[in-house]
Image (cartoon, rainbow, N blue to C red):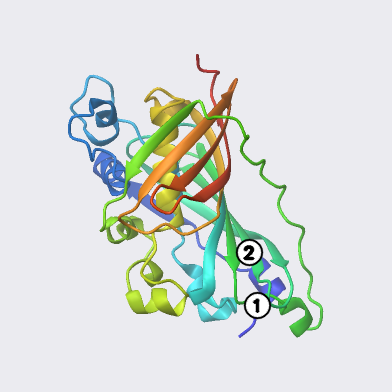
Amino acid sequence: MTINYQQLKDRPFAPVHQDYSQRDTMLYALSLGVGNDPLDARNLPLVYEGMAQPLQALPTMSSVLGYPGFWAKEADTGIDWVKLVHGEQRTTIHQPLPVGAKVVGKTRVTRVIDKGAGKGAIVVSERSLEGEDGTRYATLEQVTFCRGDGGYSEALGGQPSDPSLPALAPTPDTAPRWTYTHTIRPEAALLYRLMGDYNPLHADPQVAQAAGFDKPILHGLATYGMVCHALVMTACNGDASLLRSMHARFSSPVFPGETLRTEVWQEGDALQFRALVVERGIVVLSHGNASLAAAQP
């Protein structure tokens, strides 16, 4: 099959209702490696309910709540799902996430962009995460790069192609204000998939090899969550409620077992960041832009 522009734009998504608890909140953080150092008490408010400081949810937990599932794998999308990769994730936090609540996710496809034959296509979906009382917690935009689907417009008689999203600003050339290092556990992808993303690319070596990788790769949103944790531990001084937006581009795959280093710049309440794999010396998450509720000292 081939991507059908109008069919994707009109694709219906049933609202996804989800009831999560503080146990789920702690498991999400643990799936990202929060708490790997048992003597670092700064992480405990994200993974342990017994602290004087109340338990907090990482803002990127919104990415796994009200999630419609791996819908791009469905045959009627026309997407060559084996070859797709997560291109960008853009998250705006309207209210800090509760550590437990009943929420609903409402998803729609907002853009379908043809980059041309041999160059791939881009599908942008937007999810609004709300409480059952109508409280808006987050708006999430996922940019999916469909590597095997470029040229759909010409193949199907010149179907429309939407404009791209506004570009994210690159990180500065100056030295970062903070750095933060994560050691990614070997089973990290197998653990993170239990958050709701069951794409076999992250578990099955044969699927990963068919997609051009030597072995299963880490979910982009797991890397994204790890970097969110780094921002909370550095720019937010451990207070997850201060982070109000986080946008980034996935520039290269990450493999479980590697070491992730996040570099952070700050100007007032605006942050810029990127993440590198130490062992390979390559940037894996770039063009990071975030904002805080208030400027930090």
Answer above or below: position of 195 versus 245. Answer: below
Whether residue 70 sits left or right of residue 168 in the image: it is left
Instruction: Look at the image and tell me whether residue 19 can be seen.
Output: yes
Identify the residue shown where x is 39% and y is 25%: 239
Asked whether the beta carbons under mark 1 and mark 2 sit within 8 Å of each other, the answer is yes
Q: Nearer the viewer, residue 247 or 274?
A: 274
Which quadrant does the N terminus fall into?
A: bottom right
Element type where label 1 sits in the image: loop
> Marks 1/2: CA distance?
10 Å
Identify the residue shown where x is 29% and y is 40%: 34
Please identify the quarter of the rendering in which residue 218 is found.
bottom left
N-terminal of the pair, mark 1 or mark 2, is 1
Q: Amino acid at mark 2?
A: Val
Identify the residue shown where x is 41% and y is 30%: 232
Name the outermost residue toward the right.
Answer: 158
Image x and y of residue 153, in percent: 76, 77
**Circle 2 sits on which residue?**
123
Packing grade of label 2 (10 A; few <14, some 14-19, many >=20) is: many
